[in-house]
């Protein structure tokens, strides 16, 4: 088992690398950002925040939509193994899925909603994509109700369904959490 000092150092290095990858992504240097996200994942597959979300974003920006979707799905499917003491399990270790990754849920939901707008697909596939996208966006919002991006996506869904009362309610929530609070200056 590695020394706690070494573990903290590796975690710190991962966070620095993730921040560097985020900066490169923001500067539209997607290929370089992808390499760093993949390197972080290779050296620490249990890293939080999950670099698979960033990998998917880079693939999406590089117009590799299927690989982006696969990365986000993998982020949701990652099985974490926790000690029994954490879960009160009968076995010494228990596998638990990662349902709390609201970013991956939101991105997969938006991808499905976009797929549902493709007029070349049969109506059944479009309807199925819309329903699954709606469910994923709702799950993302339930996981983090302060997520203004999820609230914004819900607003669009409510508009498409004609539920204007929910649009106003969702819009108010979105505005509450998207405004930056500045310190009072005197």
Image (tube, helix red, strand yellow):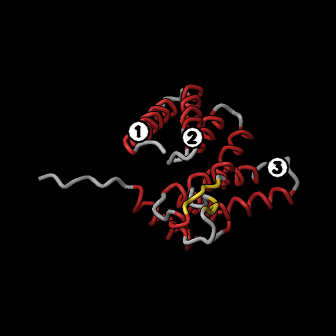
Return the residue at label 1.
6
Of discs 1 and 3, which sits in the foreground? 1
Label 1 crowding class (10 Å Cα cut-off): few <14, some 14-19, many 20+? few
CA–CA distance in space, label 3 to label 2 = 29 Å
Return the residue at label 3.
119
Element type where label 3 sits in the image: loop
* Residue drawn at (54%, 40%) of the image: 44
Q: Are marks 3 and 2 in contact (CB under 8 Å)?
A: no
Q: Toward which corner of the image does residue 127 lie, by quadrant?
A: bottom right
**Could you tell whether 113 is left or right of 104 in the image?**
right
Query: Measured from the top left, where is residue 114 in percent x and y?
Result: 71, 50
Which of the two labelled residues, at mark 2 and mark 1, occupies the earlier sequence position? Answer: 1
Dot label at residue 54: 2
Q: How many labels were placed on the picture? A: 3
Of discs 2 and 1, which sits in the foreground? 1
Element type where label 1 sits in the image: helix
* Residue drawn at (64%, 55%) of the image: 79
**Could you tell whether 98 is left or right of 15 in the image?**
right
């Amino acid at each position: 088992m590695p020394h706690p000092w070494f573990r903290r150092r590796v975690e710190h290095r991962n966070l620095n690398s993730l921040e560097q990858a985020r900066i490169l992504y923001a500067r539209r240097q997607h290929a370089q950002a992808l390499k760093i996200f993949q390197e972080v994942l290779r050296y620490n597959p249990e890293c939080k925040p999950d670099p698979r979300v960033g990998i998917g974003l880079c693939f999406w920006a590089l117009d590799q939509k299927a690989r982006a979707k696969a990365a986000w799905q993998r982020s949701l499917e990652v099985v974490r193994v926790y000690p029994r003491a954490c879960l009160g399990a009968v076995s010494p270790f228990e596998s638990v899925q990662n349902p709390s990754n609201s970013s991956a849920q939101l991105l997969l939901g938006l991808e499905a909603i976009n797929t549902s707008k493709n007029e070349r697909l049969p109506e059944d596939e479009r309807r199925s994509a819309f329903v699954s996208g709606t469910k994923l966006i709702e799950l993302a919002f339930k996981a983090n109700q302060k997520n203004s991006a999820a609230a914004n996506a819900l607003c669009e869904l409510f508009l498409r369904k004609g539920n204007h009362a929910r649009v106003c309610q969702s819009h108010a929530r979105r505005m509450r959490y998207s405004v930056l609070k500045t310190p009072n200056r005197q």
